[in-house]
Image: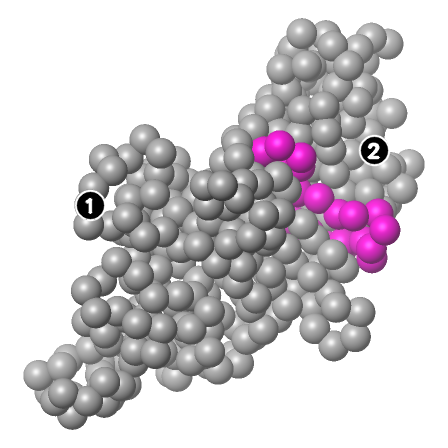
Amino acid sequence: MPSSNVQNPFALTRLNSLFPGQMGVDGGWTETGLRTHVTGVDIYVDPNYPGATATADGTDPTNPLTTITAALAKCENFRGDTIHVMANDGWQYGPNSTDYTTVINEDVVVTKHGVRIVGVAPSSPLGVIWRPATAGGVACTVQALDVLIEGFCFVESSAGVGGGNGILAAWNGTTTWGDSMVVRHCYFSDSIDTAIELNYAWNCEIHDNVFQECDTCGIYCDPANSAASYIIIRDNVFHDVGESATGAVNMDEADHCTIYHNSIFNSNAVAAAVATDEGVNLANGGNNMVYENSFSCLLPAGANGDIDDLCTASATDAWVGNNCMNGLLVTNPT
């Protein structure tokens, strides 16, 4: 599962006996310790830790913050900061303990460049549970460069609210954008609408994630907004994503992207039913490379559910060596 591959290097190993803070003073801890990084700071988030607050020091694991938003406020651009988000028992099939019941329930906006947000000690093999806070909201909007997100399981908004989206890399039309974002080792559940949306995002990498029956789309570019470019999408699992909706990968107008080693299952295609562009849709884009992916459909046959129904290439794409159920695709789907 995705979260089993999470890597969690620390910039700073605390030695509180050698570098103590001021006893009894919240926030009095020193950020000094045994450094493994030139400047980076480790910030801890655990809403289930006794006494945790949104105003805590956060750089000491025994004085964590309650929200990712509060942790981001303590980050600095390109310093190499890491936000470590602790486990919770929010997975519906979890042990349902009484100790870790508070999940990450935020619509976070990342505006600090070069920040890493990692879910650690996952309470399920899927990752640390993260819910959007509002109906139809976005759990994490990235408007900064070089942001890395890993180790989370994105699920729908809180009970009684429902729906919601996972990650949005967004340009605001003027000065902020979500270029060079990396999303890896995450799980997007069947209760999420759109898992990842790219709005004028360049040079992003999306790999080793699971997209499980997301309602609307796995990876999406809204044709009403500026297209994404130079995106790498590799080694992901898409299972019945966006069925009868926008599909697994819908990147209208995207160009110079590379898509490889992905598994894309669509039950409509298996049943030879209508599956129009529910696989990979790169219409109106150009110069994309798509190779060595596996699709749950037949080679071109002029019928519902075949590769020409499931996927669409742009005229200047190169689709090379993609696997269908009855053979190797040697042409671009139309």
Does 65 appear above or below 313?
Answer: below
Residue 124 percent location from the top left of the image:
31, 39
Q: Residue at x 58, y 48 (%)?
A: 135
Does residue 216 show up magenta in the picture? yes
Mark 2 element type: loop
The label on residue 98 is 1
Query: Viewed as shown, does residue 257 lie left or right of 209?
Result: right
Of 312 and 117, the residue lying toward us: 117
Does residue 223 show up magenta in the picture? yes
Say few, some or many: other residues with alpha carbon within 10 Å of mark 2 (under 14 / 14 to 19 / 20 or more).
many
Task: Mark yes or no: residue 307 visible.
Answer: no
What residue range appears in magenta? 214-233
Task: Mark yes or no: residue 281 visible.
Answer: yes
Query: Viewed as shown, does residue 107 lie left or right of 61?
Result: right
Residue 105 percent location from the top left of the image:
44, 54
Q: Residue at x 65, y 64 (%)?
A: 178
Mark 1 element type: loop
Q: Quadrant of residue 21?
A: bottom left
Does 13 appear above or below 288?
Answer: below
Residue 127 percent location from the top left of the image:
37, 45
In the picture, the quarter occupied by the N terminus is: top left
The label on residue 313 is 2
Query: Viewed as shown, does residue 334 lie left or right of 1?
Result: right
Of 42 and 295, the residue lying toward us: 42
Q: Residue at x 49, y 41 (%)?
A: 160
The label on residue 256 is none
Q: What residue type is labelled 2?
A: Ala
Tell me which numbered mark, 1 or 2, is placed earlier along the sequence.
1
